[in-house]
């Protein structure tokens, strides 16, 4: 027996030390938002975020950061995801490390859910105010009811300073200026403490006398009525009456202190203003598309027709927040997250300018480790194995034409 | 000689042992109810109790008393029937609130930094006191179900109003009318809780204009009567002493 006890003690000590070592010497932060694990087809075929800009990469507490850009609600919205009849422009951050001061779609403040139209493009802006120091991954994000979160690109932003300096002032319509960080806090603590003590007093009145065994024996002996005295009943009545009086008094006091209150505001906002439809002057037909698994490369055969009046070249292929660029045509200067940017990831078999009226068939290859890192290659395991994205064509003056592609994708394992 | 007599050597020792059992029993009872009632509360009322921008005058008022009258009904039966103790409902809500505050303070605030004025739990003590005192004064489960559970449902909203009234003061926020609670929900980002899952102010109860809270409270009170009645049978089942008789 002693041997067994010694062994248990020994191994318990070893386990404790192992657990201590494992948690003390290496405890990395979990900072991701699951963006890589979301089904690839969902990221490719729902919301396309582009022209994104994060106004700052380092901010101090109370400073603001603006995220601006556009999102296109893709025409080939998958059947397995509910249409965005009710969607919410959210932000992917680890808790309220920033507060969301403002968010707009098409210039309209959107504190509530909205209805989006498939096929339309909207501009958006989110204003965040720094609250908690640290390095935070900040994602654009659209929640769709029946679809879940559709996460956009994320960028690291550093907040410097101390959270104790954070303020969130607000002026009510009754003229009171408050700080939301601590508004109503004392009142909340007071009423909870008051009622907790009140409830404890009720219990203590009873448990100052024997609680379990003697009373159980008395009840079993048929003498339960002797356990509740007339005084007990009077105390009970007093507690009940005091409860009613205090609640009525507290409610009327609250009503006189806050005579003007409104219900919570709710309901889907409709009529979001999309950007004006600009029909692309470049028509693109996908002849075929394959994904070569070992090479982490997608190849497309495209027939491109330039219906515009200026020659254009293909500069970018965008899908699921990953941007494949042909740096001879277009270079990113917005500080887009590096892990989502393949600056020379786009190869076009003939990327000389396509003249107005010309139709040309080209082979396009988009290759980068991002296919694997962002698990876009997993599209071959999706129930509807189609890829989708946006193609950006540029003329000599830097003007842009956007065409979308949506076609089946055949994997190649050789 | 009975087993009880043989366990102690004097009356003073018997009293001492009895009190020790009381304190241990109360401690264990408090935390067992805390754990089980807390899980029940999280699974049934969940977000309605987590956030100030879910505490509306329709669904929060309706749902919370109905789903929370359960454990008080069962524990009341157990403590009253076996020990003639009329504090079953109060000990339930105090243990629940203890667990809630530990959760809200250390998890919501200490871990993820949501301000406590945004994620405080609801006050439940007034309703529990009414349930307990009605049972004490009537000694009847039926009367407690009808009068006590109705009081439990009716007093919930006025009991919480002193805390939530300041959060319903109107604000003009960038051209929109919002309550302070709405702004809390908007400002303090909940990445995993999009606005559309917020179940507030839904329903067809529009003919009462702005005075829907009393109607919701009455509906909640009626349902609380029914749920109390059902759950007191759970207490009856848990309070069985058949195994003691058998031994």
Image (cartoon, coloured by chain):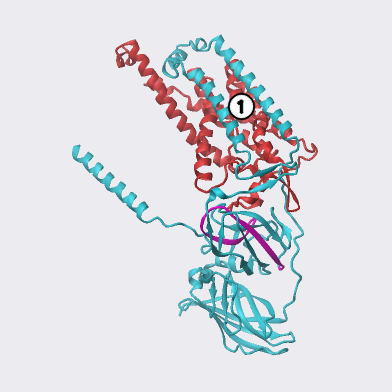
Chain colours: A cyan, B red
Residue B73 rendering spot, x and y as whole percentages: 56, 27
The answer to whether residue A274 is above or below residue A208 is below
The answer to whether residue A365 is above or below residue B109 is below
Among the 4 quarters of the image, the one containing residue B97 = top right
Residue occupying image coordinates x 76% and y 39%: B205
As for residue A144 lying within the magenta part, the answer is yes
Residue A90 rendering spot, x and y as whole percentages: 63, 57
The reply, left or right, for residue B101 in relation to residue B185 is left
Q: Quadrant of the C terminus of chain A?
A: bottom left
Residue A59 rendering spot, x and y as whole percentages: 56, 60
Residue occupying image coordinates x 54% and y 53%: A132
In this view of the protein, can residue B24 be seen by the observer?
A: yes
The answer to whether residue B113 is above or below residue A30 is above
Between residues B214 and A77, which one lies in front from this camera angle? B214
Residue B222 rendering spot, x and y as whole percentages: 68, 30
In this view of the protein, can residue B138 be seen by the observer?
A: no
**Stretch in magenta:** A119-148
Q: Identify the residue under disc 1.
A: B126
Label 1 Cα neighbours within 10 Å, binned few <14 / some 14-19 / many ≥20: many
Q: Quadrant of the N terminus of chain A?
A: top left
| Callout 1: SS | helix
As for residue A277 lying within the magenta part, the answer is no
The answer to whether residue A106 is above or below residue A175 is below
Which chain letter matches label 1? B
Residue occupying image coordinates x 58% and y 32%: A192
Between residues A164 and B19, which one lies in front from this camera angle? A164
Number of on-image labels: 1
């Amino acid at each position: 027996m002693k041997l067994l006890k010694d062994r248990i003690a020994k191994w318990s000590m070893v386990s404790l030390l192992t657990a201590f070592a494992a948690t003390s010497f290496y405890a990395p932060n979990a900072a991701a938002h699951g963006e890589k694990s979301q089904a690839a087809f969902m990221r490719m075929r729902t919301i396309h975020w582009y022209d994104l800009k994060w106004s700052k990469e380092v901010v101090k507490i109370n400073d603001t950061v603006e995220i601006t850009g556009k999102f296109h609600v893709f025409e080939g919205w998958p059947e397995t995801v509910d249409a965005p009849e009710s969607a919410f422009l959210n932000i992917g951050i680890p808790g309220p490390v920033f507060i969301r001061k403002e968010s707009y779609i098409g210039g309209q403040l959107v504190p509530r859910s909205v209805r989006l139209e498939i096929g339309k493009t909207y501009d958006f802006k989110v204003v965040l105010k720094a609250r908690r120091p640290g390095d935070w991954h900040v994602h654009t994000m659209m929640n769709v009811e029946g679809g879940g979160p559709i996460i956009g690109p994320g960028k690291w932003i550093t907040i410097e300073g101390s959270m104790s300096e954070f303020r969130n002032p607000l002026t009510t319509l009754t003229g009171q200026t408050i700080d939301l960080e601590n508004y109503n806090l004392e009142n909340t603590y007071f009423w909870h403490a008051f009622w907790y003590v009140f409830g404890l007093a009720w219990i203590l009145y009873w448990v100052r006398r024997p609680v379990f065994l003697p009373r159980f024996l008395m009840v079993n002996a048929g003498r339960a009525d002797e356990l509740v005295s007339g005084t007990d009943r009077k105390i009970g009545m007093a507690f009940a009456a005091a409860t009613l009086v205090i609640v009525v008094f507290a409610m009327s006091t609250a009503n006189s202190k806050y005579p003007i209150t409104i219900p919570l505001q709710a309901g889907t906002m409709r009529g979001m203003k999309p950007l004006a439809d600009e029909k692309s002057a470049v028509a693109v037909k996908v002849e075929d598309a394959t994904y070569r698994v070992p090479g982490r490369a997608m190849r497309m055969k495209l027939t491109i027709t330039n219906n515009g009046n200026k020659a254009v070249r293909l500069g970018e292929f965008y899908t699921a927040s990953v941007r494949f660029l042909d740096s001879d045509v277009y270079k990113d200067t917005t500080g887009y997250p590096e892990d989502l940017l393949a600056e020379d990831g786009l190869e076009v078999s003939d990327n000389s300018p396509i003249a107005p009226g010309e139709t040309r068939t080209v082979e396009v290859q988009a290759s980068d480790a991002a296919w694997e890192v962002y698990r876009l290659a997993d599209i071959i395991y999706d129930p509807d194995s189609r890829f989708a994205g946006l193609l950006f064509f540029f003329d000599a003056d830097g003007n842009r034409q956007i065409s979308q592609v949506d076609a089946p994708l055949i994997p190649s394992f050789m | 000689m009975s087993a009880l007599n043989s366990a102690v050597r004097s009356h003073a020792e018997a009293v001492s042992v009895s009190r020790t059992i009381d304190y241990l029993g109360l401690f264990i009872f408090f935390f067992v109810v805390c754990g089980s009632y807390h899980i029940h509360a999280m699974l049934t009322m969940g977000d309605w109790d987590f956030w100030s921008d879910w505490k509306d005058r329709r669904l929060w008022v309706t749902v919370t008393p109905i789903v929370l009258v359960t454990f008080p009904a069962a524990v009341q039966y157990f403590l009253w029937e076996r020990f003639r103790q009329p504090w079953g409902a109060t000990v339930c809500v105090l243990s629940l609130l203890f667990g809630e505050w530990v959760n809200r303070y250390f998890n919501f605030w200490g871990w993820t930094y949501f301000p406590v004025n945004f994620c405080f739990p609801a006050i439940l003590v007034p309703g529990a006191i009414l349930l307990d005192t009605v049972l004490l004064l009537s000694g009847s489960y039926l009367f407690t179900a009808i009068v006590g559970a109705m009081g439990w449902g009716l007093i919930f909203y006025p009991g919480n109003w002193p805390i939530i009234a300041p959060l319903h003061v109107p604000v003009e926020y960038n051209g929109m009318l919002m309550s302070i609670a709405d702004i809390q929900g908007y400002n303090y980002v909940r990445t995993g809780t999009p606005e559309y899952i917020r179940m507030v102010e839904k329903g067809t109860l529009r003919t009462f204009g702005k005075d829907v809270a009393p109607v919701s409270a009455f509906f909640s009170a009626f349902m609380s009567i029914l749920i109390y009645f059902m759950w007191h049978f759970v207490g009856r089942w848990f309070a069985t002493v058949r195994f003691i008789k058998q031994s």
